[in-house]
Amino acid sequence: MKKWQKLSASSMEIASDLLQSTEGINREDKMNQNPLRTFKSINPADGSIVWEGEETSPADVAHAIESAEQVFVSWASLSIDERSSYLMRFSDKLDEKRQFLAEVISKETGKPLWESRNEVNAMRAKITLSLEAYGTRCAGIIHRKDDVCSITRHRPHGVVAVMGPFNFPGHLPNGHIVPALLAGNTIVFKPSELAPWTGEEMIRCWDEAGLPAGVLNLIQGGRSTGQALVRNPAIQGLFFTGSYATGKSLSEFFASTPWKILALEMGGNNPLVIGQVSDWDSAVNLTIESAFLTSGQRCTCARRLIVPQSKEGDLFIDKLAEQTKQLSIGPYTNTPEPYMGPVISEQQAQHLIEVQKNLIEKGGRSILEMRHMQKGTGLISPGLIDVTSIAERTDEEIFGPLLQIIRVHNIAEAIVEANNTKYGLSAALFSDSEEEYHSFYQSIKAGVINWNMPLTGATSAAPFGGIKCSGNHRPSGFYAADYCAYPVASMERPTLTKKQEPQSPRCCN
Protein backbone atom coordinates (compact mmCIF):
# COMPACT_ATOMS: atom_id res chain seq x y z
CA MET A 1 0.00 0.00 0.00
CA LYS A 2 1.49 3.35 -1.02
CA LYS A 3 1.76 6.17 1.47
CA TRP A 4 -0.85 8.29 -0.29
CA GLN A 5 -3.54 5.67 -0.51
CA LYS A 6 -6.53 6.16 1.72
CA LEU A 7 -5.71 4.66 5.12
CA SER A 8 -7.51 7.37 7.02
CA ALA A 9 -8.66 9.41 10.02
CA SER A 10 -11.05 12.21 10.84
CA SER A 11 -11.17 15.98 10.62
CA MET A 12 -11.64 17.29 14.16
CA GLU A 13 -13.23 20.25 12.44
CA ILE A 14 -15.91 22.78 13.15
CA ALA A 15 -19.29 21.11 12.77
CA SER A 16 -18.34 17.76 14.32
CA ASP A 17 -15.28 17.83 16.53
CA LEU A 18 -13.54 14.50 16.72
CA LEU A 19 -13.39 14.58 20.50
CA GLN A 20 -16.19 16.19 22.46
CA SER A 21 -14.70 15.56 25.90
CA THR A 22 -12.02 13.66 27.76
CA GLU A 23 -14.67 11.13 28.68
CA GLY A 24 -15.37 10.73 24.97
CA ILE A 25 -11.72 10.00 24.28
CA ASN A 26 -11.39 7.43 27.04
CA ARG A 27 -14.67 5.67 26.39
CA GLU A 28 -14.07 2.12 25.16
CA ASP A 29 -16.19 1.49 22.10
CA LYS A 30 -16.34 -1.45 19.72
CA MET A 31 -14.61 0.30 16.86
CA ASN A 32 -13.51 -2.86 15.12
CA GLN A 33 -17.12 -3.99 14.85
CA ASN A 34 -18.27 -0.85 13.06
CA PRO A 35 -18.46 -0.96 9.26
CA LEU A 36 -16.18 1.47 7.45
CA ARG A 37 -17.89 4.70 6.55
CA THR A 38 -17.77 6.07 3.03
CA PHE A 39 -17.50 9.84 3.02
CA LYS A 40 -17.35 12.51 0.36
CA SER A 41 -15.73 15.86 -0.20
CA ILE A 42 -18.18 18.42 -1.56
CA ASN A 43 -17.39 21.53 -3.59
CA PRO A 44 -19.14 24.16 -1.44
CA ALA A 45 -19.60 26.45 -4.44
CA ASP A 46 -21.93 24.11 -6.34
CA GLY A 47 -22.58 21.04 -4.19
CA SER A 48 -20.78 18.64 -6.53
CA ILE A 49 -18.79 15.65 -5.24
CA VAL A 50 -15.05 16.11 -5.87
CA TRP A 51 -13.65 13.17 -3.85
CA GLU A 52 -15.02 10.00 -2.30
CA GLY A 53 -13.40 7.29 -0.18
CA GLU A 54 -13.63 5.04 2.85
CA GLU A 55 -12.46 5.98 6.30
CA THR A 56 -9.47 4.17 7.70
CA SER A 57 -10.18 1.27 10.00
CA PRO A 58 -8.59 1.19 13.47
CA ALA A 59 -6.47 -1.74 12.28
CA ASP A 60 -5.12 0.31 9.37
CA VAL A 61 -4.42 3.25 11.67
CA ALA A 62 -2.32 0.93 13.80
CA HIS A 63 -0.59 -0.32 10.64
CA ALA A 64 0.24 3.26 9.60
CA ILE A 65 1.74 3.97 13.02
CA GLU A 66 3.73 0.73 12.93
CA SER A 67 5.08 1.67 9.50
CA ALA A 68 6.25 5.02 10.89
CA GLU A 69 7.84 3.27 13.89
CA GLN A 70 9.73 0.82 11.73
CA VAL A 71 11.51 3.48 9.69
CA PHE A 72 12.02 6.07 12.43
CA VAL A 73 15.59 5.08 13.34
CA SER A 74 16.76 4.95 9.73
CA TRP A 75 15.12 8.30 8.90
CA ALA A 76 16.42 10.01 12.03
CA SER A 77 19.92 8.64 11.32
CA LEU A 78 20.15 10.55 8.05
CA SER A 79 22.06 13.80 8.09
CA ILE A 80 20.24 17.13 7.90
CA ASP A 81 21.56 17.54 4.37
CA GLU A 82 20.15 14.15 3.35
CA ARG A 83 16.72 14.90 4.81
CA SER A 84 16.83 18.37 3.28
CA SER A 85 17.30 16.86 -0.17
CA TYR A 86 13.88 15.19 0.08
CA LEU A 87 12.34 18.50 1.11
CA MET A 88 13.82 20.22 -1.90
CA ARG A 89 12.52 17.52 -4.25
CA PHE A 90 9.09 17.95 -2.67
CA SER A 91 9.34 21.69 -3.36
CA ASP A 92 10.10 20.90 -7.01
CA LYS A 93 6.99 18.70 -7.19
CA LEU A 94 4.85 21.50 -5.74
CA ASP A 95 6.21 23.83 -8.39
CA GLU A 96 5.61 21.29 -11.13
CA LYS A 97 1.99 20.70 -10.05
CA ARG A 98 1.16 24.15 -8.66
CA GLN A 99 -1.76 24.86 -11.02
CA PHE A 100 -3.31 21.43 -10.46
CA LEU A 101 -2.92 21.68 -6.68
CA ALA A 102 -4.44 25.16 -6.65
CA GLU A 103 -7.47 23.87 -8.56
CA VAL A 104 -7.83 20.97 -6.12
CA ILE A 105 -7.84 23.40 -3.18
CA SER A 106 -10.36 25.68 -4.91
CA LYS A 107 -12.70 22.82 -5.81
CA GLU A 108 -12.56 21.34 -2.32
CA THR A 109 -12.73 24.50 -0.18
CA GLY A 110 -14.36 27.00 -2.55
CA LYS A 111 -11.45 29.43 -2.39
CA PRO A 112 -10.88 31.76 -5.33
CA LEU A 113 -8.06 30.43 -7.48
CA TRP A 114 -5.85 33.45 -6.77
CA GLU A 115 -5.96 32.54 -3.10
CA SER A 116 -5.30 28.84 -3.71
CA ARG A 117 -2.25 29.72 -5.80
CA ASN A 118 -0.96 31.79 -2.89
CA GLU A 119 -1.43 28.78 -0.62
CA VAL A 120 0.67 26.53 -2.86
CA ASN A 121 3.34 29.26 -3.02
CA ALA A 122 3.33 29.41 0.79
CA MET A 123 3.84 25.65 0.93
CA ARG A 124 6.95 25.97 -1.22
CA ALA A 125 8.25 28.92 0.80
CA LYS A 126 7.95 26.83 3.96
CA ILE A 127 10.80 24.61 2.79
CA THR A 128 13.45 27.35 2.78
CA LEU A 129 12.06 28.93 5.95
CA SER A 130 12.14 25.59 7.78
CA LEU A 131 15.77 25.04 6.84
CA GLU A 132 16.61 28.51 8.15
CA ALA A 133 14.53 28.01 11.29
CA TYR A 134 16.12 24.67 12.15
CA GLY A 135 19.58 26.15 11.71
CA THR A 136 18.66 29.06 13.98
CA ARG A 137 16.44 27.44 16.62
CA CYS A 138 18.15 24.03 16.80
CA ALA A 139 21.75 25.00 16.21
CA GLY A 140 24.36 22.89 17.98
CA ILE A 141 26.10 24.75 20.80
CA ILE A 142 29.64 23.87 21.87
CA HIS A 143 31.54 25.23 24.89
CA ARG A 144 35.11 24.04 25.53
CA LYS A 145 37.14 24.16 28.71
CA ASP A 146 40.47 22.40 28.58
CA ASP A 147 39.71 18.93 27.16
CA VAL A 148 36.02 18.95 28.12
CA CYS A 149 33.22 19.90 25.72
CA SER A 150 29.70 20.90 26.69
CA ILE A 151 27.59 20.15 23.59
CA THR A 152 23.90 20.81 22.95
CA ARG A 153 22.29 18.84 20.13
CA HIS A 154 18.69 18.24 19.11
CA ARG A 155 16.81 14.98 18.61
CA PRO A 156 13.44 14.13 17.04
CA HIS A 157 10.58 12.85 19.21
CA GLY A 158 9.69 9.77 17.17
CA VAL A 159 6.33 9.10 15.53
CA VAL A 160 4.17 12.23 15.61
CA ALA A 161 0.60 12.89 14.47
CA VAL A 162 -0.35 15.93 12.38
CA MET A 163 -4.01 16.98 12.20
CA GLY A 164 -4.85 19.50 9.51
CA PRO A 165 -7.75 21.97 9.17
CA PHE A 166 -9.94 22.68 6.13
CA ASN A 167 -9.29 26.40 5.78
CA PHE A 168 -5.66 25.94 4.67
CA PRO A 169 -5.68 22.22 3.86
CA GLY A 170 -2.23 22.38 2.27
CA HIS A 171 -0.35 25.19 3.97
CA LEU A 172 -1.16 24.59 7.64
CA PRO A 173 -0.45 20.84 7.87
CA ASN A 174 2.57 21.43 5.63
CA GLY A 175 3.75 23.90 8.27
CA HIS A 176 3.99 20.99 10.73
CA ILE A 177 5.04 18.23 8.34
CA VAL A 178 8.05 19.96 6.78
CA PRO A 179 9.84 20.95 10.03
CA ALA A 180 8.90 17.63 11.66
CA LEU A 181 10.46 15.64 8.82
CA LEU A 182 13.50 17.88 8.75
CA ALA A 183 14.05 17.25 12.48
CA GLY A 184 13.96 13.48 11.87
CA ASN A 185 10.45 12.55 13.01
CA THR A 186 8.18 10.16 11.13
CA ILE A 187 4.55 11.16 10.73
CA VAL A 188 0.96 9.97 10.57
CA PHE A 189 -1.04 12.74 8.88
CA LYS A 190 -4.78 13.17 9.13
CA PRO A 191 -6.29 15.85 6.87
CA SER A 192 -9.58 17.49 7.66
CA GLU A 193 -12.53 15.31 6.80
CA LEU A 194 -13.74 18.33 4.83
CA ALA A 195 -10.59 18.48 2.68
CA PRO A 196 -9.31 14.91 2.15
CA TRP A 197 -8.46 15.37 -1.53
CA THR A 198 -5.95 18.14 -0.88
CA GLY A 199 -4.26 16.01 1.76
CA GLU A 200 -4.09 13.06 -0.60
CA GLU A 201 -2.54 15.06 -3.42
CA MET A 202 -0.03 16.64 -1.07
CA ILE A 203 1.14 13.20 0.09
CA ARG A 204 1.26 12.07 -3.53
CA CYS A 205 3.80 14.84 -4.15
CA TRP A 206 5.96 13.51 -1.31
CA ASP A 207 5.68 10.01 -2.78
CA GLU A 208 6.75 11.26 -6.22
CA ALA A 209 9.63 13.12 -4.56
CA GLY A 210 10.98 9.75 -3.44
CA LEU A 211 10.31 10.03 0.31
CA PRO A 212 11.03 6.56 1.77
CA ALA A 213 7.97 4.41 2.48
CA GLY A 214 6.62 4.72 6.01
CA VAL A 215 8.16 8.12 6.76
CA LEU A 216 4.91 9.98 6.06
CA ASN A 217 1.62 8.07 6.30
CA LEU A 218 -1.80 9.37 5.27
CA ILE A 219 -5.00 8.46 7.10
CA GLN A 220 -8.49 9.77 6.25
CA GLY A 221 -11.97 9.39 7.67
CA GLY A 222 -14.26 9.66 10.67
CA ARG A 223 -14.31 10.04 14.42
CA SER A 224 -13.47 6.44 15.38
CA THR A 225 -10.41 6.53 13.12
CA GLY A 226 -9.17 9.69 14.77
CA GLN A 227 -9.71 8.21 18.21
CA ALA A 228 -7.63 5.19 17.21
CA LEU A 229 -4.79 7.55 16.25
CA VAL A 230 -4.95 9.62 19.43
CA ARG A 231 -5.16 6.60 21.74
CA ASN A 232 -2.22 4.75 20.23
CA PRO A 233 0.63 4.75 22.79
CA ALA A 234 3.29 4.84 20.05
CA ILE A 235 2.40 8.44 19.15
CA GLN A 236 5.04 10.68 20.77
CA GLY A 237 3.58 14.03 19.74
CA LEU A 238 0.51 15.68 18.26
CA PHE A 239 0.44 18.87 16.19
CA PHE A 240 -3.13 20.14 15.89
CA THR A 241 -4.95 23.05 14.24
CA GLY A 242 -8.69 23.33 14.94
CA SER A 243 -11.32 24.32 17.44
CA TYR A 244 -10.78 25.20 21.10
CA ALA A 245 -13.23 22.51 22.25
CA THR A 246 -11.25 19.78 20.53
CA GLY A 247 -7.89 21.23 21.55
CA LYS A 248 -9.01 21.36 25.18
CA SER A 249 -10.11 17.73 25.06
CA LEU A 250 -6.81 16.71 23.53
CA SER A 251 -4.92 18.61 26.20
CA GLU A 252 -6.90 16.90 28.95
CA PHE A 253 -6.31 13.49 27.39
CA PHE A 254 -2.57 14.02 26.91
CA ALA A 255 -2.23 15.32 30.47
CA SER A 256 -1.80 11.68 31.54
CA THR A 257 1.27 11.42 29.27
CA PRO A 258 3.19 14.64 29.97
CA TRP A 259 6.29 13.33 28.20
CA LYS A 260 4.51 13.65 24.85
CA ILE A 261 4.76 16.93 22.95
CA LEU A 262 1.48 18.70 22.15
CA ALA A 263 1.30 21.78 19.89
CA LEU A 264 -2.16 23.36 19.67
CA GLU A 265 -3.46 26.23 17.52
CA MET A 266 -7.11 26.88 18.37
CA GLY A 267 -8.27 30.07 16.68
CA GLY A 268 -9.55 33.24 18.30
CA ASN A 269 -12.13 35.96 18.80
CA ASN A 270 -9.79 38.55 17.35
CA PRO A 271 -10.17 42.33 17.92
CA LEU A 272 -9.42 45.06 15.38
CA VAL A 273 -9.27 48.51 17.00
CA ILE A 274 -9.73 51.78 15.11
CA GLY A 275 -7.74 54.59 16.73
CA GLN A 276 -6.59 58.00 15.50
CA VAL A 277 -6.93 57.55 11.74
CA SER A 278 -6.63 60.14 8.97
CA ASP A 279 -6.77 57.85 5.91
CA TRP A 280 -10.22 56.34 6.32
CA ASP A 281 -10.23 54.75 2.86
CA SER A 282 -7.18 52.67 3.76
CA ALA A 283 -8.76 51.78 7.10
CA VAL A 284 -11.86 50.51 5.28
CA ASN A 285 -9.83 48.46 2.78
CA LEU A 286 -7.65 46.88 5.45
CA THR A 287 -10.70 46.15 7.62
CA ILE A 288 -12.32 44.26 4.75
CA GLU A 289 -9.13 42.29 4.22
CA SER A 290 -8.93 41.58 7.94
CA ALA A 291 -12.51 40.36 8.24
CA PHE A 292 -13.50 38.79 4.93
CA LEU A 293 -10.41 37.26 3.35
CA THR A 294 -10.99 33.51 2.83
CA SER A 295 -14.69 34.24 3.53
CA GLY A 296 -13.80 34.99 7.15
CA GLN A 297 -12.33 31.50 7.57
CA ARG A 298 -8.81 32.37 8.63
CA CYS A 299 -7.93 31.82 12.27
CA THR A 300 -6.60 35.39 12.38
CA CYS A 301 -9.65 37.06 10.81
CA ALA A 302 -11.16 40.03 12.67
CA ARG A 303 -14.25 38.95 14.61
CA ARG A 304 -14.74 42.17 16.60
CA LEU A 305 -14.30 45.67 15.16
CA ILE A 306 -13.88 48.26 17.92
CA VAL A 307 -14.72 51.76 16.64
CA PRO A 308 -14.77 55.22 18.29
CA GLN A 309 -18.19 56.53 19.29
CA SER A 310 -17.83 59.68 17.18
CA LYS A 311 -18.95 61.29 13.94
CA GLU A 312 -15.79 59.99 12.25
CA GLY A 313 -16.58 56.51 13.54
CA ASP A 314 -20.10 56.74 12.09
CA LEU A 315 -18.76 57.75 8.68
CA PHE A 316 -16.19 54.96 8.79
CA ILE A 317 -18.89 52.34 9.43
CA ASP A 318 -21.08 53.77 6.65
CA LYS A 319 -18.15 53.60 4.22
CA LEU A 320 -17.27 50.09 5.39
CA ALA A 321 -20.83 48.89 4.80
CA GLU A 322 -20.91 50.43 1.33
CA GLN A 323 -17.58 48.87 0.32
CA THR A 324 -18.49 45.48 1.78
CA LYS A 325 -21.70 45.43 -0.28
CA GLN A 326 -19.61 45.65 -3.43
CA LEU A 327 -17.44 42.61 -2.75
CA SER A 328 -17.70 40.00 -5.49
CA ILE A 329 -18.79 36.58 -4.26
CA GLY A 330 -19.01 33.34 -6.21
CA PRO A 331 -17.31 30.15 -7.40
CA TYR A 332 -13.66 30.30 -8.40
CA THR A 333 -14.65 29.65 -12.03
CA ASN A 334 -16.29 33.08 -12.33
CA THR A 335 -14.64 35.65 -14.60
CA PRO A 336 -13.29 37.87 -13.23
CA GLU A 337 -12.40 35.84 -10.15
CA PRO A 338 -14.38 36.72 -7.03
CA TYR A 339 -12.96 38.24 -3.87
CA MET A 340 -14.85 35.75 -1.73
CA GLY A 341 -15.82 32.15 -2.33
CA PRO A 342 -18.26 30.15 -0.22
CA VAL A 343 -17.79 29.02 3.36
CA ILE A 344 -16.84 25.37 3.67
CA SER A 345 -20.36 23.89 3.52
CA GLU A 346 -24.06 24.64 3.26
CA GLN A 347 -24.39 23.52 6.89
CA GLN A 348 -21.85 26.10 8.00
CA ALA A 349 -23.63 28.81 6.01
CA GLN A 350 -26.90 27.93 7.75
CA HIS A 351 -25.15 27.92 11.11
CA LEU A 352 -23.79 31.42 10.50
CA ILE A 353 -27.24 32.72 9.56
CA GLU A 354 -28.53 31.27 12.84
CA VAL A 355 -25.72 32.97 14.77
CA GLN A 356 -26.64 36.30 13.18
CA LYS A 357 -30.31 35.76 14.06
CA ASN A 358 -29.43 35.04 17.69
CA LEU A 359 -27.32 38.19 17.94
CA ILE A 360 -30.19 40.29 16.61
CA GLU A 361 -32.60 38.68 19.09
CA LYS A 362 -30.20 39.61 21.93
CA GLY A 363 -30.21 43.27 20.87
CA GLY A 364 -27.71 43.48 18.04
CA ARG A 365 -28.40 45.91 15.19
CA SER A 366 -27.80 44.56 11.70
CA ILE A 367 -25.93 47.10 9.57
CA LEU A 368 -25.39 44.77 6.64
CA GLU A 369 -27.32 41.52 6.71
CA MET A 370 -25.47 38.32 5.94
CA ARG A 371 -27.51 36.24 3.45
CA HIS A 372 -27.33 32.65 2.25
CA MET A 373 -27.08 33.26 -1.48
CA GLN A 374 -27.79 29.85 -3.00
CA LYS A 375 -29.38 26.71 -1.59
CA GLY A 376 -27.14 23.64 -1.66
CA THR A 377 -23.95 25.71 -1.43
CA GLY A 378 -21.87 27.58 1.13
CA LEU A 379 -22.20 30.86 -0.78
CA ILE A 380 -22.96 33.57 1.74
CA SER A 381 -22.66 37.35 1.69
CA PRO A 382 -20.62 39.19 4.35
CA GLY A 383 -22.41 40.79 7.27
CA LEU A 384 -21.88 43.65 9.73
CA ILE A 385 -23.71 43.79 13.05
CA ASP A 386 -23.45 46.33 15.87
CA VAL A 387 -23.44 44.41 19.18
CA THR A 388 -22.59 47.33 21.46
CA SER A 389 -25.95 47.19 23.23
CA ILE A 390 -25.75 43.47 24.01
CA ALA A 391 -25.01 43.39 27.72
CA GLU A 392 -23.44 39.92 27.82
CA ARG A 393 -21.82 39.10 24.51
CA THR A 394 -20.96 35.46 23.86
CA ASP A 395 -17.21 34.97 23.60
CA GLU A 396 -16.91 32.57 20.67
CA GLU A 397 -15.08 32.29 17.39
CA ILE A 398 -17.61 32.96 14.62
CA PHE A 399 -15.86 31.23 11.74
CA GLY A 400 -17.22 33.09 8.75
CA PRO A 401 -17.85 36.53 7.21
CA LEU A 402 -19.78 38.13 10.09
CA LEU A 403 -18.06 41.10 11.71
CA GLN A 404 -19.32 42.37 15.09
CA ILE A 405 -18.98 46.10 15.73
CA ILE A 406 -18.47 47.54 19.21
CA ARG A 407 -18.44 51.30 19.89
CA VAL A 408 -16.15 52.82 22.55
CA HIS A 409 -15.23 56.33 23.74
CA ASN A 410 -11.42 56.22 23.86
CA ILE A 411 -8.36 54.03 23.31
CA ALA A 412 -8.25 52.90 26.94
CA GLU A 413 -11.81 51.61 26.69
CA ALA A 414 -10.96 50.02 23.34
CA ILE A 415 -8.05 48.09 24.86
CA VAL A 416 -10.24 46.82 27.69
CA GLU A 417 -12.82 45.68 25.16
CA ALA A 418 -10.18 44.06 22.95
CA ASN A 419 -8.93 42.01 25.91
CA ASN A 420 -12.46 40.99 26.87
CA THR A 421 -12.06 37.47 25.48
CA LYS A 422 -10.79 34.10 26.62
CA TYR A 423 -8.85 33.86 23.35
CA GLY A 424 -5.52 35.42 22.44
CA LEU A 425 -4.48 34.67 18.88
CA SER A 426 -4.28 38.00 17.04
CA ALA A 427 -5.11 41.68 17.47
CA ALA A 428 -4.53 44.82 15.43
CA LEU A 429 -4.66 48.59 15.73
CA PHE A 430 -5.18 51.08 12.91
CA SER A 431 -3.82 54.40 14.12
CA ASP A 432 -1.49 57.23 13.13
CA SER A 433 -0.40 57.58 16.74
CA GLU A 434 2.73 55.77 17.84
CA GLU A 435 1.75 56.52 21.43
CA GLU A 436 -1.57 54.71 20.94
CA TYR A 437 0.22 51.72 19.47
CA HIS A 438 2.68 51.63 22.36
CA SER A 439 -0.21 51.48 24.84
CA PHE A 440 -2.00 48.90 22.69
CA TYR A 441 1.05 46.66 22.32
CA GLN A 442 1.91 46.79 26.01
CA SER A 443 -1.61 45.88 27.10
CA ILE A 444 -2.99 43.47 24.49
CA LYS A 445 -2.89 39.76 25.32
CA ALA A 446 -2.29 38.01 21.99
CA GLY A 447 0.42 36.10 20.17
CA VAL A 448 0.17 38.20 16.98
CA ILE A 449 -0.14 41.99 17.31
CA ASN A 450 -0.21 44.17 14.17
CA TRP A 451 -0.11 47.93 13.64
CA ASN A 452 -1.60 49.44 10.47
CA MET A 453 -1.49 46.00 8.89
CA PRO A 454 -4.42 43.64 8.35
CA LEU A 455 -5.12 41.10 11.07
CA THR A 456 -4.66 38.39 8.49
CA GLY A 457 -1.10 39.57 7.91
CA ALA A 458 1.05 36.75 9.31
CA THR A 459 4.26 35.25 8.01
CA SER A 460 6.03 31.91 8.41
CA ALA A 461 9.22 33.91 8.93
CA ALA A 462 7.94 34.72 12.44
CA PRO A 463 6.36 32.64 15.20
CA PHE A 464 2.63 32.02 14.73
CA GLY A 465 0.44 31.14 17.67
CA GLY A 466 -1.71 32.46 20.46
CA ILE A 467 -2.10 32.44 24.23
CA LYS A 468 -4.96 31.70 26.60
CA CYS A 469 -7.55 29.55 24.78
CA SER A 470 -5.84 30.09 21.41
CA GLY A 471 -2.79 27.93 22.04
CA ASN A 472 -0.48 26.19 24.49
CA HIS A 473 2.70 28.22 24.00
CA ARG A 474 3.88 26.10 21.09
CA PRO A 475 3.77 28.62 18.22
CA SER A 476 4.27 27.36 14.69
CA GLY A 477 5.72 29.34 11.80
CA PHE A 478 9.43 29.99 12.35
CA TYR A 479 9.21 28.51 15.86
CA ALA A 480 7.79 25.16 14.71
CA ALA A 481 11.36 23.84 14.93
CA ASP A 482 11.09 24.18 18.73
CA TYR A 483 8.37 21.54 19.13
CA CYS A 484 9.68 19.23 16.41
CA ALA A 485 12.89 18.40 18.29
CA TYR A 486 14.13 18.41 21.87
CA PRO A 487 17.55 19.53 23.14
CA VAL A 488 20.08 17.08 24.59
CA ALA A 489 22.95 18.42 26.72
CA SER A 490 26.21 16.43 26.87
CA MET A 491 29.49 16.77 28.76
CA GLU A 492 32.15 15.03 26.68
CA ARG A 493 35.86 14.27 27.03
CA PRO A 494 37.82 12.05 24.61
CA THR A 495 39.83 10.23 27.32
CA LEU A 496 38.82 8.69 30.64
CA THR A 497 40.86 10.19 33.48
CA LYS A 498 40.48 10.46 37.21
CA LYS A 499 38.57 13.52 38.30
CA GLN A 500 40.91 16.10 39.80
CA GLU A 501 40.28 17.17 43.37
CA PRO A 502 39.26 20.81 43.64
CA GLN A 503 42.02 23.00 45.05
CA SER A 504 41.41 24.84 48.32
CA PRO A 505 41.07 28.57 47.87
CA ARG A 506 44.05 30.60 48.98
CA CYS A 507 43.61 33.00 51.86
CA CYS A 508 44.88 36.51 51.60
CA ASN A 509 46.94 37.91 54.50
Image (tube, helix red, strand yellow):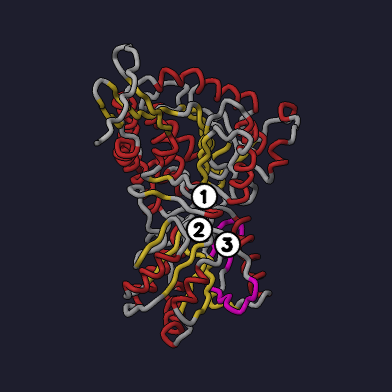
User: According to the image, label 1 marks what residue?
Assistant: 471
Q: CA distance from mark 1 to mark 3?
A: 35 Å
Determine if residue 506 is in view.
Answer: yes
Q: Position of residue 483 (x, y in %)?
A: 44, 38
Would you call the spot at circle 3 few (<14 residues within 10 Å), some (14-19), or many (20 or more)?
Answer: some
Are the residues flagged by discs 1 and 2 in contact, CB closer than 8 Å? yes
SS assignment at label 3? loop
Where 388 falls versus 497 (above or below)? Answer: below
On the rendered image, what quadrant is the C terminus found in? Answer: top left
Q: Foreground residue, 147 or 174? A: 147
| Range of magenta residues | 371-392
Q: Position of residue 85 (x, y in %)?
A: 30, 27
- Of circles 1 and 3, which is in front? 1
Q: CA distance from mark 2 to mark 3?
A: 34 Å
Q: Is residue 140 toward the left or the right of residue 406 in the image?
A: left
Q: Is residue 82 toward the left or the right of residue 178 in the image?
A: left
Would you identify the image quadrant in which residue 349 lies?
bottom right
Q: Is residue 44 magenta?
A: no
Are the residues flagged by discs 1 and 3 in contact, CB closer than 8 Å? no
Q: Which mark is residue 29?
A: none
**Type of amino acid under label 2:** Gly
Q: Which mark is residue 424?
A: 2
Where 285 falls versus 455 (above or below)? Answer: below
Q: Is residue 378 magenta?
A: yes
User: According to the image, label 3 marks what residue?
Assistant: 374
Q: Residue at x 45, y 49 (%)?
A: 106
Determine if residue 382 is in view.
Answer: no
Q: CA distance from mark 1 to mark 2?
A: 8 Å
